[in-house]
Image (cartoon, rainbow, N blue to C red):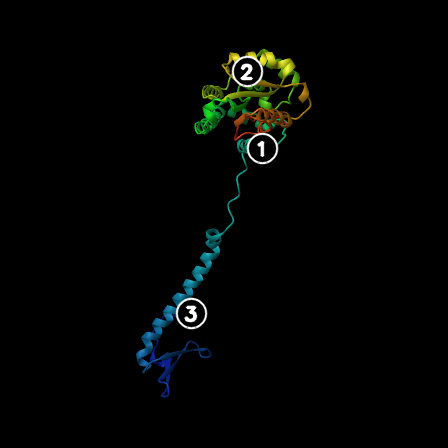
Amino acid sequence: MVIPAQPIGKSQVSCRHHASCSRHILSIISSPTKPISIFVFGPSCLTMEGFIISEMAKRVRDILSMFVLAIFSKVIGTKLYSRRSAPAEPESEANVCLSWRLAVEANNMPGWSTVPLHCLSHVETYMMGGQYEQDVNYIVEQIESYVSQVVLKGDGCDGCDAWILDIDDTCISNLFYYKDKNYGCDPFDPGDFVAWVMKGECPAIPAILGLFTKLVEGGFKVFLLTGRDQQTLAPATIANLHNQGFIGYHRVIFRNQSFKGKSAVAFKSEVRKQLVEEGYRIWGNVGDQWTDLQGECLGNRTFKIPNPMYCVP
């Protein structure tokens, strides 16, 4: 109930004094039937009029403040303290394809067959726009940093300190072939790929060629290990490697008839196992496929070169 702001006369205030506790009971008559009783402590009613008015005004202010705060909280409070975040914007196609490529490189999608068609532009931009080259260069920097810390056994005198490098899209690139295949969106065609290899036009990947040269000059025996067929593709492959500057390797190892029908992991594991049995110490293993880096006798370190265009199961 709001009390009008008007002077309170003596006729409106009556006092009853209780000597036992020195308390005055003041009744302010707001209507003939509904008095409001206010209990105050003090020696005299006449000296309490100003106090009463002040207390009533303060109470009204408190009530109004609480009312305004309640309204303010309802209007704004939920926005200020809400834990719900704003609705997420729809994911862009580029972000989706970036996530896809990350899943591929992290081997979270083993055995994938083709690049999703909606990611063609993303893969093209990655491979041709400079990021792929930058990623390869960075990885090679990490490899070279590791190589600089390797101490050859017997200063390399026994000739058994080895490195293994894959060939396709590790040493030499099939990028121009896959460009005509929509950067991996088209299904793999074995006949077309053999025809491409026979041309011997795969360019060297510059950073890997530099790494290869440093390994050879550093006294390591470098083995080039490939899933290409020995009977049909060996001459064209060796000529291609030589033309691109890969000279000085210890051995190129192809897939021969004894490995016909075996998986890439089984084939390359067996080859590495044979090298270890021959006494070679495999310090490092570099490849663009996870199947280059899985299985037995992997070596001290493995290094993955990015390749979002195809997957060798």
Q: Residue furthest bottom?
A: 19
Q: CA distance from mark 2 to mark 1?
A: 26 Å
Q: Quadrant of the N terminus?
A: bottom left
Would you name the residue on which mark 3 appears? 2
**Residue type at tag 2:** Cys
Residue found 36% across the figure and 72% down from its top: 55
For image coordinates 46% across by 57% down, the residue present is 73
Determine which residue is flagged by label 2.
202
Amino acid on which the number 1 mark rests in the picture: Asn
Query: In terms of sequence position, does the residue under pointer 3 or pointer 2 come before the other?
Result: 3
Q: Nearer the viewer, mark 3 or mark 2?
A: 2
Ranked by sequence position, the earlier of labels 2 and 1 is 1
Where disc 3 sits, the SS reads loop
Residue 305 in sight from this viewpoint: no
Which residue is under mark 1? 107
Q: Nearer the viewer, residue 261 or 176?
A: 261
Q: Amino acid at mark 3?
A: Val
Q: Position of residue 37 (x, y in %)?
A: 42, 78
Q: Are marks 2 and 1 in contact (CB under 8 Å)?
A: no
In percent of the image, x 58 and y 14: which residue is there?
Answer: 237
Q: For the C terminus, which image quadrant?
A: top right
Task: Residue at 43%, 60% (x, y): give it.
Answer: 69
Judge from the rendering whether residue 203 lies leftward or rightward of residue 46; answer left or right.
right
Image height check: is 141 above or below 249?
below
Front disc: 1 or 3: 1
282 on left or right of 313: left
Residues packed near mark 3 inside 10 Å, few (<14), some (14 to 19) or many (20 plus) = few
Residue 229 tag number: none
- Element type at mark 1: loop
Q: Position of residue 50 (x, y in %)?
A: 32, 74
- Cα separation between marks 1 and 3: 75 Å
